[in-house]
Image: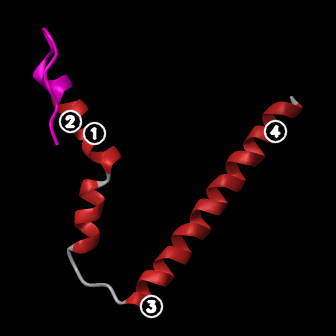
Amino acid sequence: MQVDSRKDEYIEKLIRRFIKKVKSSGILEDHRDKQYYVKPSVKKRLKRKKAEQQRQRDRRKAEKRRKRRRK
């Protein structure tokens, strides 16, 4: 992963752009996932749990949008 510095760019901003790029690419999350062995049954369970949490988040967002439209 490489981030080129722009003209007259502060190092803090460059580091922020690098961190953002790493997070968006999923490198860090992938490394954390592969750090330990996880049984396939546990993977399925975690995947279902994560999907349910996402559905709940989506439902809450949709409700907020509906409430805003009513006003």
Marks 3/1: CA distance? 32 Å
Q: Which residues are magenta?
A: 1-14
- Label 4 element class: helix
Sequence-wise first label, 1 or 4? 1
* Percent position of residue 63, x then y: 77, 47
Give whichever of 5, 56 is nearer the camera: 5
Magenta segment main secondary structure:
loop
Q: Which residue is mark 4?
A: 67
Upstream in sequence: badge 3 or badge 1 = 1
Instruction: Say few, some or many: other residues with alpha carbon within 10 Å of mark 1 (under 14 / 14 to 19 / 20 or more).
Output: some
User: Residue 38: horizontal and vertical position, in percent?
Assistant: 32, 85
| Residues packed near mark 4 inside 10 Å, few (<14), some (14 to 19) or many (20 plus) | few
Please, is residue 55 above or below residue 3 in the view?
below
**Number of residues whose C-alpha sits closer than 10 Å to that of mark 2, classed few (under 14), some (14–19) or many (20 or more):** some
Question: Mark 3 sits on what residue?
Answer: 41
- Going from N to C along the chain, the mark reached first, 4 or 3, is 3
Where 19 falls versus 41 (above or below)? above
Q: x%, y% of residue 51?
A: 57, 68
